[in-house]
Amino acid sequence: MTEEHVYEGLFILDSEQYARDPEGVSGQIDKTIESLDGKVRVSRLWEERKLAYPIKNHKRGTYWLSYFRLNTSNLSDLNRQFQLNGNILRFLLLNIDPRLEEALVEHALIGPVKYESEPPIPEIFDSEDEVDDEDDEVVVDAVNGIDD
């Protein structure tokens, strides 16, 4: 007996091909899922970014996120078709707990967090600590049980 499961698919697409034909490249993902009797819940652009390392001589990738339902017996065929698709540089399919489906679909519709600049990095030391180590001595003395 085969069952239908909820899957999350994250795809890294060829940015050059996506820039030339965004609907055609991204539409291949939905068409492939639907050709195997899957039901796409959400399929959207996540972001474009520089890759951590080159993949097939590409330095940038377009990330595409999909949530879909698919019969488990069709999963190996889906994997194979995505592997053969030249516009998909990498992909990852995850089986999602059905209880989380609605929350994940809602989150996917909202999109990724955008920063106007780099995310803020919390400062551990203030400028006085860099120049004056007096505070550090108090901490060390307190640890050793010596009071001023």
Image: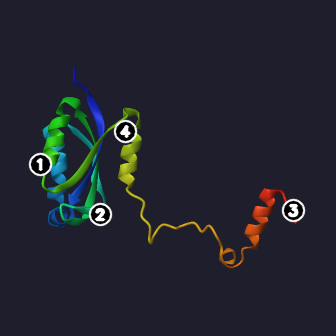
| Disc 4 + disc 3, Cβ < 8 Å | no
How busy is the neighbourhood of tag 1: few (under 14 within 10 Å), some, or many (20 plus)? few
Q: Which residue is mark 3?
A: 147
Q: Up-down: is 100 above or below 145?
A: above
From mark 2 to mark 4, how far is it between C-alphas? 28 Å
Query: In terms of sequence position, does the residue under pointer 1 or pointer 3 come before the other?
Result: 1
Residue at 27% x, 46% y is: 92
Identify the residue position indicated by label 1 in the image: 84
Which of the 4 quarters of the picture holds residue 140? Answer: bottom right
Q: Nearer the viewer, mark 4 or mark 3?
A: 3
CA gap, disc 2 and disc 3: 53 Å
Residue type at the position of mark 4? Glu
Residue furthest to the right in view is 148
Could you tell whether 50 is left or right of 117 in the image?
left
Q: In the shown orientation, is residue 67 left or right of residue 15?
A: right
Amino acid at the residue labelled 3: Asp
**Residue at numbered disc 2:** 51
